[in-house]
């Protein structure tokens, strides 16, 4: 399109406002923040199936609550004649460049715009489809182009965004990071390497006071601090005359994020300081071009804006204000546009050419139309809609899988745990004599209430079963999922079935098939009441958006028990609970009676006996050889440098590089090893799992929670990034703790993963609910200090427990960001499958709650071999030699526990 089709606006006029469709119930829209409908159109027009998050030729259009109660074509014709007034909604098309921060933008816009944006990947719509929705359906008021890996010069990285910036001259557009660079690139500016990559670091920004920065201070020491994630920049010397610089920063201006800094909620701006402090309306653009790094640009005549920094980051000040300003820009633009030009836009020559090129019979467009018109005139309130959505989802699965009614019985023994020697002795006496097919989700570190409950059990009653899943064709790059599931019940009957849709889909259907009475667990202070206990291996990332696995795991890719009998220890109140679930026509009374009798027969003397037995365990021998590293020190350091090259080129912000250490074993008592490990390295998310049929035992002392969903539908993640050894003296220990706390490198690592986890939770949580109650809190454990953050959100009513896991797996602290591109790079550098390491261990309760850890600090015993995985986040600030030392540090506690048995 030709920009001359419209007279030049004044600089501050170039921004839109739309006469949005009227909705009868705002709460209804916000109660359904992410109504997903797949257009399912392959390139070429054939109907196909979406592949989740991975890039593919199929279109999976994410339509977030597009509704209308009037005919769109009539609305389009009518818009030019309605009274000029601002409306309650602004409808955004959010184009995702396969980034891991897009849904942070989504969350912001959902609240600020009054309706969630529509999210599409940059290769999911053809240009003709986009024009149809934008111009004929009149579906959007503005467009936001997300950040992302790579360069705007690479078509695979930027997709349809360049056409949007070239041809949609009459639609407001805001480009963030990669989108900002694309705005410069399409108009002839050069995108070059920055003087240094800046990722997860803060800079102070100056601006020229344009409307995008209204009510935001400017200049040094005035509080406009932004988070930057970029290796490439627009060369200011090459900026064409039609692009005006609006914001910039010093090339050397970065600020460490200190714990004392107050970070506002991403939906609440700090007290706004009026523009003018430290800024001026008169700028020497020539001086700016030569000495500053561009942080913002705008087009001189089009309503197109770009910012190099990330306004959606949790640590960016005034980020919400920027999105609010863009909404106002949009509203003002459309008001003035209608007033001045009325129907010129609809009848411009360029638009006629676009319309003539569109296909009249497109399956994706037809489906979109149906969606737009299907929801009109609905008057349901938020509560009614949530109930109907969940009921419909559950009923659908019941119809296909057959529902199962589970009954729960439980008994409580107040203040019993301490009297019988604690959780360790309870497990050893009830389950330690025959350790086959036993589990123990063990909160062995309960300091500062990091964890409270331990769950334990073994092969149980009639409902007990074991699930073992192996992906098919993992290493040939041809599989998007699917694999073989082996099931064995309590009677020993076994079968193997092929799961075309994969393990997570199977697990989801299983959990949705259970019926239960909530009154039966009223009064229980914990969320696991029976259900699946086990692990999900790292390679199940192929069911969460990754195209393929380069390496094949020796261990099963997922292994779970269905636990129908449980013993639970409440470490806070010293209580013990026993629980049993059964179907309506059966009973668990006998198991409850037997377990109660065993518990009450224990006394304090058991603790000493157990201690002696542990001493006996330590005399058993493993192979005398030590652990051998998968990669030498030199090779690991070279891998770190290779990661940094990818980061320098903009392919990733952070790469979590790992490796494996292995050791042959013989006649090693695995329970004794675990008891020793938990004593020497207690951890809040520790675990023991023994899958005897698979010759597999897991001894885990993880300090990191991956994801938890409680009965109140609160999702919580607690990523760890930043680790340092404990000191030999109290003074040295405190100095090391402070060194970690104020390390810019570790702060950057942590912040990048916090923003990534906010994104993952934002995919499945109510708009405005994702928040960070603790940012970069330093926690101390037996051997290390770690930097931990906490992210929480309110789960949407229309997603299941497994949907939440699928949106966030693998844990971002083990991948880097952006997640998909980073995992592809990691797969090309690492020389073997991570297997269980980097996956998660925990439970899925039959009532849709779950709690899962990150598998780190863990010994995997499988087929006469012990393996330990370890690694760390590589960023631009990383020192390769120090990265190697940190990796070795993390193997210390588990490797010493194994070597203790030599």
Image: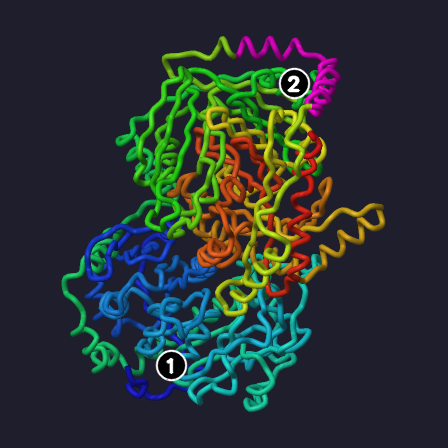
What residue span does the magenta drawing correspond to? 592-619
Magenta span contains residue 613: yes
- Badge 1 or badge 2: first in the primary sequence: 1
Q: Residue at x 41, y 43 (%)?
A: 803
Residue 642 screen position, x and y as percent:
55, 63
Q: Secondary structure at mark 2?
A: loop
Identify whether 125 is placed above or below 301.
above
Residue 711 - label = none
CA gap between label 1 and label 2 equals 70 Å
Tag 1 near tag 2, CB within 8 Å: no
For label 2, count other residues whose C-alpha is less than 10 Å away and answer few (under 14), some (14-19) or many (20+).
Answer: few
Residue occupied by mark 2: 414
Magenta span contains residue 894: no
Q: Is residue 89 left or right of residue 781?
A: left
Identify whether 667 is placed above or below 395.
above
Q: Quadrant of residue 512?
A: top left
Residue 416 screen position, x and y as percent:
67, 17
Q: Can residue 785 be seen here?
A: yes
Residue 529 screen position, x and y as percent:
50, 25
Task: Give 47 or 468, whichever is nearer the viewer.
Answer: 468
Identify whether 160 is placed above or below 427.
below
Task: Give 768 or 396, whichever is nearer the viewer.
Answer: 396
The chief SS type of the magenta part is helix
Task: Give 625 or 841, whichever is nearer the viewer.
Answer: 625
Q: Quadrant of residue 879?
A: bottom right
Q: Residue at x 71, y 20 (%)?
A: 616
Task: Give 827 or 746, whichever is nearer the viewer.
Answer: 827
Identify whether 222 is placed above or below 555.
below
Q: Residue at x 27, y 69 (%)?
A: 127
| Quadrant position of the N terminus in the picture | bottom left
Residue occupied by mark 1: 302
């Amino acid at each position: 399109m030709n920009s001359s089709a419209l007279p030049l606006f004044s600089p501050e006029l170039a921004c839109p406002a739309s006469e949005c469709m009227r909705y009868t119930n705002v709460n209804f829209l916000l109660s359904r923040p992410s109504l997903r409908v797949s257009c399912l159109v392959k390139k070429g027009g054939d109907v196909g199936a979406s592949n989740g998050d991975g890039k593919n030729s199929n279109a999976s259009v994410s339509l977030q609550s597009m509704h209308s109660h009037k005919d769109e074509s009539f609305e389009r014709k009518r818009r030019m004649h309605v009274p000029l007034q601002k409306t309650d909604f602004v409808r955004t098309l959010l184009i995702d460049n396969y980034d891991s921060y897009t849904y942070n933008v989504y969350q912001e816009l959902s609240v600020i715009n009054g309706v969630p944006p529509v999210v599409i990947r940059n290769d999911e719509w053809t240009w003709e489809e986009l024009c149809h929705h934008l111009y004929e359906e009149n579906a959007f008021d503005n467009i936001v182009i997300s950040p992302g890996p790579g360069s705007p010069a690479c078509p695979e990285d930027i997709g349809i965004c360049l056409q949007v910036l070239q041809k949609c001259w009459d639609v407001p557009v805001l480009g963030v990071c990669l989108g900002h660079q694309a705005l410069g690139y399409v108009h002839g500016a050069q995108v070059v390497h920055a003087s240094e990559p800046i990722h997860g670091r803060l800079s102070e920004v100056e601006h020229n006071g344009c409307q995008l920065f209204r009510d935001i201070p400017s200049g040094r020491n005035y509080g406009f601090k932004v988070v930057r994630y970029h290796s490439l920049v627009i060369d200011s010397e090459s900026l064409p005359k039609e692009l005006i610089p609006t914001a910039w920063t010093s090339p050397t201006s970065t600020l460490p994020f200190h714990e004392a800094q107050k970070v506002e909620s991403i939906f609440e701006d700090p007290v706004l300081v009026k523009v003018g402090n430290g800024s001026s309306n008169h700028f020497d653009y020539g001086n700016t071009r030569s000495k500053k790094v561009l942080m913002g640009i705008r087009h001189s005549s089009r309503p197109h804006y770009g910012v190099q920094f990330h306004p959606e980051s949790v640590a960016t000040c005034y980020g919400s204000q920027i999105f609010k300003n863009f909404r106002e820009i949009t509203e003002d633009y459309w008001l003035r546009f209608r007033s001045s030009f009325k129907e010129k836009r609809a009848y411009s020559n360029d638009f006629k050419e676009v319309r003539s090129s569109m296909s009249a019979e497109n399956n994706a467009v037809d489906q979109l139309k149906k969606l737009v018109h299907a929801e009109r005139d609905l008057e349901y309130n938020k509560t009614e809609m949530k109930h109907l959505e969940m009921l419909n989802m559950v009923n659908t699965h019941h119809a296909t899988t057959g529902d199962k009614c589970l009954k729960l019985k439980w008994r409580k023994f107040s203040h019993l745990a301490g009297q019988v020697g604690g959780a360790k002795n309870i497990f050893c006496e009830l389950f330690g004599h025959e350790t086959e097919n036993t589990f123990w989700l063990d909160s062995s570190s309960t300091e500062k209430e990091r964890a409270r409950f331990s769950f334990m059990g073994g092969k149980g009653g009639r409902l007990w079963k074991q699930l073992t899943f192996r992906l098919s064709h993992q290493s040939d790059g041809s599989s998007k999922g699917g694999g073989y599931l082996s099931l064995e019940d309590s009677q020993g009957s076994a079968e193997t079935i092929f799961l075309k849709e994969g393990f997570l889909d199977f697990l989801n259907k299983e959990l949705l098939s259970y019926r239960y009475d909530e009154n039966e667990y009223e009064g229980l202070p914990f969320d696991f009441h029976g259900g699946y206990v086990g692990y999900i291996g790292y390679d199940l990332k192929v069911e969460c958006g990754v195209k393929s696995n380069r390496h094949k795991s020796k261990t099963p890719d997922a292994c779970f028990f269905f636990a129908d009998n449980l013993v639970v220890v409440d470490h806070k109140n010293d209580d013990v609970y026993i629980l049993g679930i059964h179907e309506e026509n059966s009973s668990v009374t006998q198991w409850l009676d037997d377990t109660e009798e065993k518990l009450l027969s224990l006394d304090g003397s058991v603790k000493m006996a157990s201690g002696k037995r542990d001493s006996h365990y330590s005399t058993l021998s493993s192979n005398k050889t030590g652990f051998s590293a998968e990669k030498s020190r030199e090779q690991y350091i070279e891998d770190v440098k290779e990661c940094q090259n990818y980061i320098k080129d903009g392919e990733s912000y952070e790469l979590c590089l790992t490796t494996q250490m292995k050791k042959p074993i013989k006649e090693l008592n695995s329970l004794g090893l675990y008891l020793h490990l938990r004593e020497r390295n207690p951890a809040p998310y520790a675990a023991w799992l023994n899958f005897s049929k698979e010759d597999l035992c897991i001894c885990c002392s993880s300090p990191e929670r991956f994801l938890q969903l409680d009965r109140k539908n609160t999702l919580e993640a607690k990523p760890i990034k930043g680790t340092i050894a404990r000191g030999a003296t109290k003074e040295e220990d405190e100095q090391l703790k402070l060194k970690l706390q104020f390390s810019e490198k570790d702060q950057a690592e942590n912040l990048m993963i916090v923003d990534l986890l906010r994104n993952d939770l934002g995919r499945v949580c109510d708009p405005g609910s994702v928040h960070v109650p603790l940012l970069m809190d330093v926690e101390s454990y037996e051997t290390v200090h770690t930097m931990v953050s906490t992210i929480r959100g309110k789960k949407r009513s229309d997603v299941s427990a497994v949907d939440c896991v699928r949106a966030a797996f693998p844990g971002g602290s083990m991948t880097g960001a952006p997640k998909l591109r980073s995992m592809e790079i990691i797969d090309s550098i690492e020389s073997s499958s991570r297997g269980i390491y980097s996956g998660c261990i925990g439970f899925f309760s039959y009532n849709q709650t779950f709690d899962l850890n990150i598998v780190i600090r863990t010994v995997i015993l499988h087929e006469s071999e012990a393996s330990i995985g370890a690694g760390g986040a590589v960023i631009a600030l990383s020192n390769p030699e120090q990265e190697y030392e940190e990796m070795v540090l993390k193997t210390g506690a588990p490797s010493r526990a194994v070597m203790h048995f030599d």
